[in-house]
Image: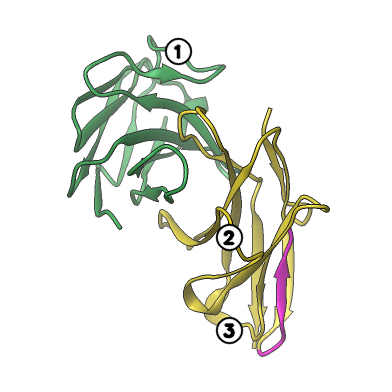
Amino acid sequence: SAVISQKPSRDICQRGTSLTIQCQVDSQVTMMFWYRQQPGQSLTLIATANQGSEATYESGFVIDKFPISRPNLTFSTLTVSNMSPEDSSIYLCSVARDSEVTEAFFGQGTRLTVV
Amino acid sequence: AQSVAQPEDQVNVAEGNPLTVKCTYSVSGNPYLFWYVQYPNRGLQFLLKYITGDNLVKGSYGFEAEFNKSQTSFHLKKPSALVSDSALYFCAVREGGNQGGKLIFGQGTELSVKP
């Protein structure tokens, strides 16, 4: 398993501002992902964080709105930019040791409320 | 494209009775299937996975799941439910091959176990 520390655990932000969420893993992992869980809904993949290169975004998500960094194999950040109330969600960091057969592990999530 | 369906938004079970949470999937290649549980204000916890081999997979907390290729199903089961099993359950699929390791989640099933 992997121990994932995600910060902050929650925040209330003003619309138009940006928030950066940090994800720290206790060991090197191959794969890191960012998910969004809107109120009462399932998880939607935002992007795959690639070490040393630009993240791979899913349909409907763009780098200008959700810039992601991954400087090494244990750390990643997700920024939610120019926030609106529609961005109010739980954002979850996830890691996996390879791309297929191993399970993914999740951080505790960041509960974001935009007012 | 890969997808997962959880046909029941909510499942209600009396404590001590067996429980089943349903999941069906759609992939073009070999499916890698996972179950996760989410307790209130918590991240996702891994329960079990099917990669290959025996169709009956045993996991954490007494849960098991049965892979049925002909019915494209992966239902989660437990012989005797506990009140503490009450939570939100997610089925997820990862398609074998070079798909980047991302998980596709079902919409979730709220399990309520009453004393």
Identified by mark 3, the residue type is Leu
Question: Residue A75 appears in which quarter of the rendering?
Answer: top left
- For label 3, count other residues whose C-alpha is less than 10 Å away and answer few (under 14), some (14-19) or many (20+): some
Identified by mark 2, the residue type is Leu
Q: Are marks 1 and 2 in contact (CB under 8 Å)?
A: no
Identified by mark 1, the residue type is Val
Chain bearing tag 1 is A
Secondary structure at badge 2 equals: strand
Q: How far from the left and from the top, in percent, is residue B44?
A: 45, 54
Residue in view at x 72 percent, y 86 percent: B17
Q: Are marks 1 and 2 on the same chain?
A: no
Magenta residues span: B16-22
Residue B52 visible from this viewpoint: yes
Residue A40 visible from this viewpoint: no
Q: Spatial distance from mark 2 to mark 3, Cα to Cα?
A: 14 Å
In the rendered image, the quadrant that contains the N terminus of chain A is bottom left
Secondary structure at badge 3 equals: loop
Secondary structure at badge 1 equals: loop
Q: Spatial distance from mark 1 to mark 2, Cα to Cα?
A: 29 Å
Chain B on-screen colour: yellow
- For label 2, count other residues whose C-alpha is less than 10 Å away and answer few (under 14), some (14-19) or many (20+): many
Q: How far from the left and from the top, in percent, is residue B21?
A: 70, 64
- Is residue A25 part of the magenta span, yes or no? no
Check disc 3 and report the residue beneath it: B82
Check disc 1 and report the residue beneath it: A62
Check disc 2 and report the residue beneath it: B88
Please indicate whether residue B109 sits to the left or right of residue A102 in the image. right
Residue B85 lies, with reference to residue A60, above or below; the image says below
Residue placed most toward the observer, A49 or A5: A49
